[in-house]
Image (cartoon, rainbow, N blue to C red):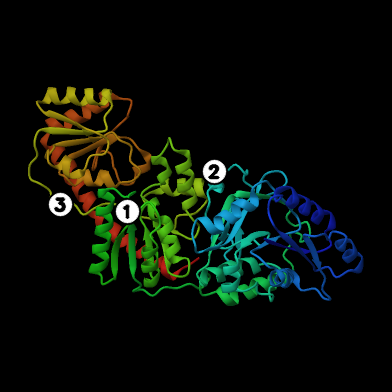
Amino acid sequence: MSLVIPSYNDVPLLTEALASIERTCADVDYEVLIVDDYIDSGVALRLKELENDRIRVILKDRRLGFAGTVNIGIQEARHDVVLLNSDVVAQPGWLEALQFSAYALDTSIGMVSPKLVYPDGRIQYGGTYYARILAPQWFGHLHVGAPATKPAANVAGYNRSISGACVYITREAIERVGVLDDEFWLGFEDVDYGLRAWERGIRCYYQPSAMLIHHESASRGYSQGKQELASMRRFWRRWDDRFLARRLPDDATVDFVVGHGSDGLWQAYISDLVDGMRAEGRDARITEIRSETTDESVVADLAARGGVVVACDRTVAETVWLATVRGGLPVYLLPAVESIWHPDDTALQSRIIAGYRPEFDYIAPNRWTAAQLQAEAAWEVRRRVAPATAPPPLPDTAERTVVTIGADPNGRAAVDDACVAEGCVSVHLDSSPKVEEVANYRPRAVVLFAEQQSSLLPFALMSLGAVYLAPVDNRLGHEVLDGYNSLLFSRADSDQLRRSLRDVLADDDVWAELRSNGHASASRAAAAAVRGVADALLDFSQAPV
C-alpha cells in the first residue's frame, strides 16, 4: 500500500497524521510518500527528520499545487495508492474498509472515499454531489455539519466523485484514468478525477465504515481565491455539457423502470403514462427488474439508449442512477417518500433516504410528499403530478353493497350499523386489496380507512361507480374533495361515518351525483397525469438547473 501525502508547512499536523497511520495500520505493509510543496529549506529539514524505513520525503524545486504535488507521489508509488491530506487523523479499521470496498463489492469500483468528520464529530464529507440546487457552479459534500451518526450518512454506496482529502485508488484505476489534471491548482481536481474515472468505466464509491478526522482548511483557508476560481472555470470548460448546459432532444427515449417496490396499481399507472407518450410519438417503454441486486445488463441497456430514465420505486433507484451517471437524465417518479412504508426497519429507511440522490429530478404526487422529501433528504421536487389511472366506463347500476378497506373494529361496526339500517350488505377487506377485487362486488359505496400517500387508489376506487368515503386527510386535499367527489369523516367520529353512509345508501340522487363527480374527477386526473409527466420530462430535459 502506498500512502501519498502532500505537505505544505504542516509538520505538526503531518506528525499527528503519521502517528494515526502507524496506530491503525500495524498489520499492513505500507509505504508513505510525503511530497513537499512549500519549498522552504527549513521546512524540508524538518520533513526529512520524519523519514524511516516506511516513510520517504520527496522534495521539489518549485511549487506545483495540490494536483501536481500528489501526481509526483502517485508516479513514485509501487502499489495501490491512498491519497491523504496531511491534516487527517485515521481511525481504526479505516484502511481495511476502503480496501474491502475496492475489491469485494464490485469489480468496477476503483476509487473509494471514506467519511470525514471535523474534530467535534460533525460530518465534513459524506460523499460528493453536484450542488445545482443551491450553487450550480460548485460541487459539494453531502451531510456537511450533521452528526457522524446520521443514519443516511452511514449508508455505503456509489459516489458521484471522490474527496482528495482521502481516497483509495487501485492500480487498475491509475492505469485507466491516469493521474490528476495538474492544471488545476487548488479545487475541483478531485471532482474532475472522479468524473474521469466514471468516463473510463471506473466507479467511485463512498464507504462510511472508514472514518477519519479531518482538520479541513488548516492549510487552505475557507475563502475562494483567484486560483480556486480559475480551477472552477477550468472544470466547467471540460464538463459544461454534462451539467450546466446539459440538454436532451425533445424526442429523447423514455424508460420507466419498475421493480418489486411497485404494486399492481402503480404499474398500471406507469403503463398508462407510457401508452400516452407513445400516442404522442415518443419512444417510451417499461423496464421491469425483479432482482434484489443491480442487473448490470439492464444498466448497460439503459445507458446505451442515453435518454430519460425514470425510477418508479426505491428498488430500482441505484440501477437508474448508474445508467445515467455518464449521460442521460435520471428522474424519480415518487409514489411517496417510501421510508414511511417501513416504520419498523430503520436500516431500510436509511437506505431508502440515501437512495434519494440530488442528481434525480423529482416528480411528487402531492405537496406533502414534496415537503417530506425536502425534510428527509434535503432535495427539492421540481414538479407535482397527482397520479390516476384511466377509468373504465361508469356503470349504470350498483349492488347494495358497501366495501370497506383497512377498517378497524370501530369502523367495521359503524359500517355494519349503517348497512343493517338501510338493508345493505357490508364486505370488509384488508388494507391492500386489488382494485379488481373491489370491482367484483359492484359496490354502491367504498370506505377506504387505510392511509394513502397519493391520490392513486382513491381515484381508482372513484372509477368503479361507487361513492368514495374516507377519513379526512390533508395530504389529498386537492384531489379528494369532500361533498363533491367524496364524503369525508373524522377518523375518531363513528357517528359522522354512519350518517354519511346512510345518506349515500338511502338517497339515490346523492349517490348518483357523488359517484358521477368521482368518476369524472378520476378521468380528468388520469388525462392530466399523462400530460403532466410528459411536460415535466420535457422541461427537465431542457432546463438542467
Left or right relative to 369: residue 138:
right
Q: Which mark is residue 290?
A: 1
**Closer-to-camera residue (229/434):** 434
* Closer to us: 178 or 100: 100
Mark number displayed over residue 425: none
Check whether the beta carbons of the residues at disc 1 and disc 3 lie within 8 A of each other.
Answer: no
The amino acid pointed to by label 2 is Pro
Q: Which badge, 3 or 2, comes first in the chain's sequence?
A: 2
User: To which residue does mark 2 refer?
Assistant: 151
Q: Which residue is mark 3?
A: 392
**How would you rate the neighbour count of disc 1 (Cα within 10 Å): few for under 14, some for 14-19, many for 20 or more?**
few
Say few, some or many: other residues with alpha carbon within 10 Å of mark 2 (under 14 / 14 to 19 / 20 or more). some
Q: CA distance from mark 2 to mark 1?
A: 27 Å
Q: In the shown orientation, is residue 373 left or right of residue 469? A: right
Picture layout, residue 248 above or below residue 380? below
Q: Position of residue 306 (x, y in %)?
A: 40, 71
Note whether 324 is above or below 206 in the view shown: below
Q: Identify the residue at horizontal 65%, vertical 69% (top origin).
A: 189
Query: Of helix, strand and loop, which one carries label 2?
Result: helix
Whether label 2 touches label 1, CB < 8 Å: no
